[in-house]
Amino acid sequence: MIFGADPGLGEVVLLSLKVSCSAVALAIFFGLPLGAFLALYRFPGRGLTIICVNALMGLPPVVIGLLVYIIFSRAGPLGVFGLLYSPSVMIIAQLLLVLPIIAALSRQHFVDLWHEYGDQLMSLGSNRWRAVPTLLWEGRVNLVTVGLAGFGRAIAEVGAVMIVGGNIDHYTRVMTTAITLETSKGNLSLALGLGIILLLLSVFVNLGVSLARAVTIRQGV
Amino acid sequence: MCRIVFFYFFSIFILFYTLGISEVLAGRNIKLATTTSTENSGLLKRLLPVFENRKDIKVLVIAVGTGQALKIGKDGDADVLLVHDSVAEKEFMQKGFGISRREVMSNDFIIVGPQGDPARIKGGRDAVKAFKKIYSNSIKFVSRGDDSGTHKAEKRLWETASNILPWNVTSTSWYNEVGAGMGQTLNIAIGMGAYTIVDRGTWLAFKNKREHIIMVEDKETLHNPYSVILINPNIHPHTKSEDAKQFYDWVIGEEAQEIISEYRIDGERLFLPNIDIYK
Amino acid sequence: MNFSGVLPLSFNDVSLSLEGRVVLDNVSLDILPHERTIILGPNGAGKTTLLRLCHGLISADSGEVCWQGPQAGMRSRRQAMVFQRPIMLRRSVRANIAYGLKFTGLSYRQKKERVAEVIEVTGLNDLANRSARLLSTGEQQRVAIARAWALGPEILFLDEPTASLDPGGTRAIERLVEFVSGAGTTVVLTTQDLSQARRLAERIIFFHNGKAIEIADAKSFFMRPKSREAKAFLEGEILWQNKTDYKGLQLCVG
């Protein structure tokens, strides 16, 4: 019913996935090493950094959106890239939104992993640097959950993408901003339909990961 | 350690670079910052595809309040504006942020309220009188409160209608500034059973009216002209001023004016074009 | 004596406190090559800490830990350790053993040959392709020993390798330890199991309350223990850890 109602819907869902998946992939790329670094290395100001990263986890998306807006506006320091109101800047905003989650949660996992494997790996001639890829691989089941938590936050947030993306039809309109727009047009049934799609999407992703997790644990690999 | 840090900085650079490239590859386009009413009413959906087909320039619409649209234009984050707040527009032009401005079309604001009509203003033709009644009886009223064109028009109306301005009185429980777009404000007003002021286009296209109806129409006091403004390329050299100029010329030209004149919802005309023959 | 490797290993007045508790108290001892040394003692005597110190995972508060052999500089490469709880990586047994060789600088071919050889001689053929995480604790401990031994260490430390195993599993581990030791690796094993010490020991270091109370060759230790604590331990008495609130009661003799 919903797909019949609006041919642009597929486009909106696809863009949501594209933006959030890219943001989460980048957040994992930057966040996991950061988490490992905070877990395994001691440096001055480490405690403060960890507190900051944990606090950033709870930052409202609109605040991130506002910061990214100010930075990427033509009047801002990175305005020359001309990225404001584009899918790219939405990816950047969501990357910043998800990065603290990935870093903070993976840091905790790395602490636990190091506690379990640390002595054994050191004994085999590894060190804290070289152990990171091994820990990543050993903890991959839990680290996937970390990625999933990030994805959940990215796909569901509206504040940041609305401000930096501008909710431009066929260009930066994602599911959450479309829901906001349809609500503001008084089109509550369509807004609700989009909400249901968002929910289903989240259920499917979680289901997939749970399955993969169950298989991995059963096979002990 | 050093190598890894370098690697990550390099990655960030590559990231920005590829993102930049991807935006360039997105094709020829201009950014139009406009008010929510033009998008929510569905007019732009009718108007823009015609322009895009004709000139092969995509128009990316950022629909916000007029106040924010002007800010976006001032910062150079859009190439062309379509807004409705003549006082602020003139100031914008005076400061040189825009290079040219023309009236495109107009409609009018209306006062809407619950069918029960506690303020007894139904069928009125005088907006100021209606506001006075709402004011003196402290009937619930919802204001945009977002510095948009509609909000400013509303504020000017209160200034004529009452000596003490409702937003200056801290203890008022009837005057509610919600700081939201037109549609959200309507949703709130309808939920509260309150009066509010809205442009006719948004009202006609709005789908969640429930018990709310038009109370006051006052084409003179509530006249609402929309103008197109071209951003000054001397201040913001990166703006796509040539493509934006094409849009500017087209939207005040005959083809666009005819489309505006023919755009209707439920048989009712939403916007009055600026060219007389189409009025 | 003529030494060629990294041994002997000497402790001179080594002390160590962890979280305010004295774990090692002026320990002096020597670990000599080609001898199965059993570190015997009740729970909390400091055995595990001693092994971790030997292995270089922690360092002492005071005193010296000296590798005295001519190749002492190579000490980190010439020793290996098996932990009380086997830590298996999430991969096959073969891959676990291969992982141990990751940081040795051997070529791919050399590693492959070495892994095949170790699996063969340690009798892990049947388990080689199984997932290490799904094995029983006893099987995992055998893999852990094989993985450590694959490094070709001169000295192998084992921290209570049979602590949570049934007699069958214990027997399998002990056979493996005997094999490793017979193949020329110096073995240092901690245990609180007296009968295991009797079966395996050539030399005994008896630990209690962070002190090396008695160091003797196995025969004389079991025949004529010199210290009161060792005597009590051999007679099956329960030795209690020294706690500050009952200082006088280090030893509870019925």
Image (cartoon, coloured by chain):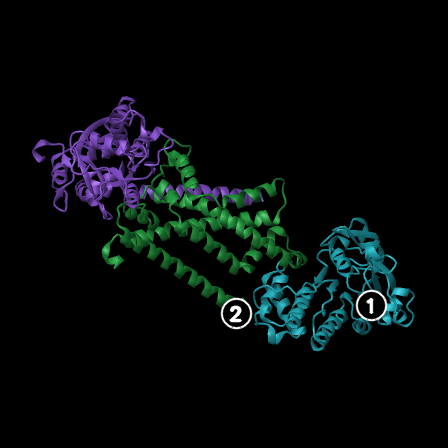
Chain colours: A green, B purple, C cyan
Q: Residues within 10 Å of mark 2 (few under 14, many from 20)?
A: some
Q: Where is residue B189 in the image (x, y as percent from the top left)?
A: 29, 42
**Label 1: how many residues lie within 10 Å, few (<14), some (14-19) or many (20+)?**
some
The label on residue A219 is 2
Hey, what amino acid is under mark 2?
Gln
Q: How far apart are marks 2 and 1 (CA)?
A: 43 Å
Using the image, determine if residue A73 lies above or below residue C5: above
Q: Can residue A139 be seen in this view?
A: yes
Question: Which label lies toward us, 2 or 1?
Answer: 1
Picture quarter with the C terminus of chain A: bottom right
Amino acid on which the number 1 mark rests in the picture:
Ile
User: Is residue B54 found left or right of C248 in the rendered image?
Assistant: left
- Which residue is at the far top? B94
For the residues beneath circles 2 and 1, the answer to whether they share a chain is: no
Give percent across and percent down for residue B28.
26, 40
Q: In terms of depth relative to the viewer, which is nearer, B233 or B155?
A: B155
The mark found on residue C238 in the picture is 1
Q: In which quarter of the image is residue A61?
A: top left
Outermost residue toward the left in this view: B277
> Relative to A221, is C114 on the left or the right?
right
Q: Which of C102 and A113 is in front in this view?
A: A113
